[in-house]
Image (spheres, rainbow, N blue to C red):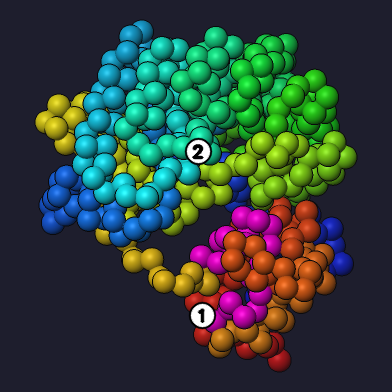
């Protein structure tokens, strides 16, 4: 393959035309995994292999992920909807989740040693649909059974409708310290089309109540919805910057999933086509400029903050190679060298717990963690921080060609040189990304991953 295959276009707007249109991969789940095969019989039960896997990381910190696979209603763009939030689900599900927590703690507790928990994340689904006292009890139980410290980030994810100030206060009193809300857009008409019920006044009121609880409050915004314009996204940012006290926000590019209600609405003509890649680039650029003007720090690739209280630890640490112990139907995680998927159906989930087993659908051995981070790990770490590794971290055989590619991307206005000796996540970096580079970051990462896995490319003749 010729090295020019990896080049960006020069002399064009880098946000809209650096590369050909590619599928958006911007809005994904947190801790969820696709359903796997049934439990590997060669692995055995969690009580048998769990302790051995858990001690593989010795004194390293770890995280917990707790999944709530219920929603009061389905949003048209969401691929993670599983169960409707029927009456009584909260008490029933919380009781099973409590049993799973106790059973898991009983297996792992003798091996905690000096290990501490960095993050706890309640994801979904919609954890905020749980009753106030049910979730408060679960949070307290985790504090009792696991090595949670005052520095542990404990996040409850939710949606505006139903996330009351009373719930927020109770969950902070129980030990939560961070709330993440999937707002997506503050435009009432667009929200209603997407299946979101709260209007802008209700959004303001709920965010004020959550802020009053003392917890860190962040929101998700999505760009690229059908009918959404750059001006609408800028108005979203103006609203949250001027009329709320949120500590930070995530900005995701819409990912369209085949067969979703939104995809079907576009196919039938009930929704207009979603903005193309060039328009999404303009939206991202406009949003980035405005966030900078309002004083938000571009903290990680998809995250901005205006308070140092917002650390975004879960997104930065728990989704990598660290241990992430999963709980709840539909959850996913990793312990030691095993990737874990939990039963997605409530029936299988509860039947396993009733038998005294952790409700795992698959526990698949994964490649061992290398003693020194691999190039791909360093690439992932640095891209998350809007940068690229220094040439010394590339495979030696590819360094000369890599330098040519990175210099070409600099000329295409996707990169700027890093400061001499600059280090991120224990990795020396060569370049930081411009806003256009951040917009194309997943594509840049994919190109470098492919480049380093192929024979050294030749130059065009």
Counting from the top left corner in percent of width and height, residue 141 is at 34, 25
- Of 287 and 320, nearer the camera is 320
* CA distance separating discs 1 and 2: 41 Å
How packed mark 1 is, by other alpha carbons closer than 10 Å (few <14, some 14-19, many 20 or more), is: few
- Nearest to the eye among marks 1 and 2: give it: 2
Viewer-side residue, 260 vs 372: 372
Q: Which residues are magenta?
A: 377-395
**Residue, x 51% and y 65% (percent of image)?**
377
Q: Is residue 145 above or below residue 321?
A: above
Q: Is residue 221 left or right of residue 374?
A: right
**Residue 389 among those drawn in magenta:** yes
Position of the N terminus by quadrant: bottom right
Q: Residue at x 31, y 47 (%)?
A: 112
Residue 228 placed where, x, y %? 73, 31
Instruction: Work out whether residue 182 can be spotted.
Output: no
Q: What crowding class fits label 2: few (fewer than 14 Cα within 10 Å), some (14-19), or many (20 or more)?
A: some
Q: Secondary structure at mark 1?
A: loop
Residue sticking out furthest to the front: 114
Where does label 2 land, which residue?
Answer: 152
Residue 68 at x, y = what percent? 39, 27
Q: Quick one: label 1 or label 2, which is nearer the N terminus?
A: 2
State yes or no: residue 172 in magenta: no
Residue 292 located left or right of residue 99? right
Expressed as whole percent of the image width and height from the top left, the position of residue 136 reads 42, 18
Vertical placement of 359 versus 372: above or below? above
Q: Are marks 1 and 2 in contact (CB under 8 Å)?
A: no
Q: Is residue 383 visible?
A: yes
Q: Secondary structure at mark 2?
A: strand
Q: Is residue 445 left or right of residue 148?
A: right
Q: Which residue is mark 1?
A: 454
Residue 205: quadrant of the picture: top right
């Amino acid at each position: 393959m010729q090295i020019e295959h990896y080049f960006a276009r020069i002399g064009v707007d880098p946000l809209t035309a650096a590369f050909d249109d590619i599928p958006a991969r911007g809005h994904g789940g947190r801790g969820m995994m696709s359903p796997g095969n049934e439990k590997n019989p060669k692995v055995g039960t969690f009580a048998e292999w769990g302790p051995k896997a858990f001690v593989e990381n010795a004194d390293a910190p770890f995280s917990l992920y707790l999944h709530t696979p219920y929603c009061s209603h389905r949003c048209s763009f969401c691929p993670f909807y599983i169960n409707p939030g029927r009456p009584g689900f909260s008490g029933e599900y919380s009781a099973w989740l409590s049993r799973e927590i106790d059973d898991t703690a009983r297996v792992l507790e003798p091996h905690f040693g000096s290990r501490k928990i960095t993050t706890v994340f309640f994801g979904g689904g919609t954890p905020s649909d749980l009753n106030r006292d049910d979730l408060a009890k679960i949070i307290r139980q985790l504090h009792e059974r696991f090595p949670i410290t005052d520095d542990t980030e404990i996040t409850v994810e939710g949606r505006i409708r139903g996330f009351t100030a009373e719930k927020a206060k109770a969950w902070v009193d129980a030990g939560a310290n961070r709330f993440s809300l999937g707002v997506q857009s503050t435009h009432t008409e667009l929200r209603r089309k997407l299946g979101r019920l709260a209007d802008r006044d209700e959004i303001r009121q709920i965010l004020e109540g959550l802020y009053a609880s003392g917890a860190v409050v962040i929101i998700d915004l999505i760009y690229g919805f059908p009918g959404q314009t750059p001006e609408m996204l800028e108005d979203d940012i103006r609203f949250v910057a001027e009329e709320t006290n949120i500590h930070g926000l995530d900005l995701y590019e819409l990912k369209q999933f085949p067969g979703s209600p939104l995809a079907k609405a576009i196919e039938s003509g009930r929704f207009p086509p979603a903005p193309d890649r060039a328009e999404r680039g303009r939206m991202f650029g406009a949003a980035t400029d405005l966030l900078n003007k309002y004083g938000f720090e571009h903290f990680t690739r998809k995250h901005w903050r205006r308070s140092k209280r917002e650390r975004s630890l879960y997104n930065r640490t728990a989704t990598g190679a660290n241990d992430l112990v999963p709980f709840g139907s539909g959850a996913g995680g990793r312990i030691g060298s095993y990737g874990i998927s939990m039963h997605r159906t409530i029936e299988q989930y509860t039947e396993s717990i009733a038998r005294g087993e952790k409700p795992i659908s698959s526990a698949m051995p994964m490649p061992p963690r290398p003693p020194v981070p691999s190039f791909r790990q360093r690439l992932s770490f640095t891209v998350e921080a809007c940068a690229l590794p220094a040439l010394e971290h590339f495979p030696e055989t590819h360094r000369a060609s890599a330098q040519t590619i990175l210099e070409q991307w600099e000329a295409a206005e996707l990169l700027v040189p890093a400061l001499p000796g600059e280090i991120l996540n224990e990795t020396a970096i060569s370049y930081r990304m411009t806003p256009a580079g951040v917009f194309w970051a997943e594509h840049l990462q994919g190109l470098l991953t492919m480049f380093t896995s192929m024979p050294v490319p030749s130059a065009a003749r």
